[in-house]
Image (spheres, helix red, strand yellow):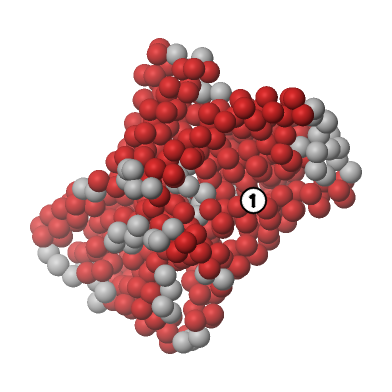
Amino acid sequence: MGLAGILVLVISFIILLVLGVPIAFSIGLSGMLTMLVSIDSLPAFTTLAQRMATGLDSFALLAIPFFVFAGQLMNRGGIAIRLIEFAKVLVGRLPGGLAFVNVMANMLFGAISGSAAASASAIGSIMHPRMTKDGYDENFSAAVNITSATTGLIIPPSNILIVYSLASGGVSIAALFIAGYLPGILMGLALMGVGAAYAVRKKYPVGEKITMREGVLKFLDAIPSLLLLVIVIGGIIAGVFTATEASAVAVLYCLILSMIYKEVKISDLPDIILKTTGTTAIVLLLVATSMGLSWVMSFENIPQTVSDGLLTVSDNPFVILLIINMILLFVGVFMDMTPAVLIFTPIFLPVVTSQLGMDPIHFGIVLIMNLCVGLCTPPVGSVLFIGCSVAGVKIQNVIKPLIPFFIAMIVVLALITFLPQISLWLPQYFGF
């Protein structure tokens, strides 16, 4: 039934998407239709509903609403502006200084908030007017913001790494968090390199000179925000709390910090909680339907069929990894990140671990970096839409300046894919 299951699944899923059915319902309905090929309707409905409920019965998933809540607090709590000022101290005087500041601020804010969308919105709304005022092309500044916002999905804490841990059957969240640092920093440096080359060619100005006293004051002002990373990741590494418990600590810390900064009032909390609830509901519905579909694919022996198909093409590990990367890049263009991780992890993880001997932690970083590219591309790229909306530019005008950044991202992806120690050195060093 493997091949028949694949055909029913793929065709029904594509038709539902073309008809404009929301992605979560498309996933659930295509999974149901695939099951109906093999078994009667009553056990098919019952089993899928049970698997969806079971898929949400995970302590690790509690981290998602907490990190979303923390991200909402940070978006409102004055943290973004302090991180931008800190980034200006570090890189503002380099060629194309404001492009560097945009990338570094996104790396810091994205890492703290764990959300590419929140990062693109918060940093872009502050940096875009400053960059255009200093003579930067508005489409270029939007491209910088859009691509650098995705680094926060790799640099921990990251909700999507938690989702991958669930989909992979329990890969250590702490190990995934630590593994994301070097690839995320490497991605940020590559984007800075593209920004610097563009700025030098266009002769964009460097940032204003900052005195030692101003630099120290801005650093001190940013320390409370930066401490969140130390508390969350340090606490996980030291074994003080789990990743889920760390998410609750992050909420408490962000709430206190926002109150100290006087950027969030008690009266603002209902609206923040409402937005958190809405985002969490969307994510968990995607998780539920995707987990149901993952079970359906396993029942129909789809992962084994895909594995056999890949091995008939080639038994060369380099070629197989190249094919998987190309498939994931293509998938990322048309599918949001959460369902893509939940659907394709059970398909490709058995292939790379059993046939190629690839570490599941390494594959998780490769998978997510592939899908990060898709967040910046039409027609489904959510970060692309947010970045263009914040900058007030048209999507078609941003595509050309985006291309050099895409090339940089794909070069880094290739390095991460074929040099596993970039991802694995830190987890191994800390004993994960």
**Which is nearer the eye, 344 or 175?**
175
Q: Is residue 407 visible?
A: yes
Reply above or below: 304 against 382. Answer: below
- Locate the C terminus by quadrant: bottom left
Q: Would you say 181 lies left or right of 1 here?
A: right
Q: What is the quadrant of residue 417 in the picture?
A: bottom right
User: Residue drawn 55% across and 64% down?
Assistant: 422
User: Residue drawn 43% across and 22% down?
Assistant: 256
Residue type of the residue flagged with mark 1: Gly
User: Residue drawn 49% across and 71% down?
Assistant: 324
Q: Residue 328, image x and y in percent? A: 49, 64
Q: What is the quadrant of residue 277 in the picture?
A: top left
**Which is nearer the eye, 307 or 179?**
179
Secondary structure of residue under mark 1: helix
Total numbered circles = 1
Q: Which residue is mark 1?
A: 188
Q: Residue 323, image x and y in percent? A: 52, 75
Reply above or below: 420 against 169. Answer: below
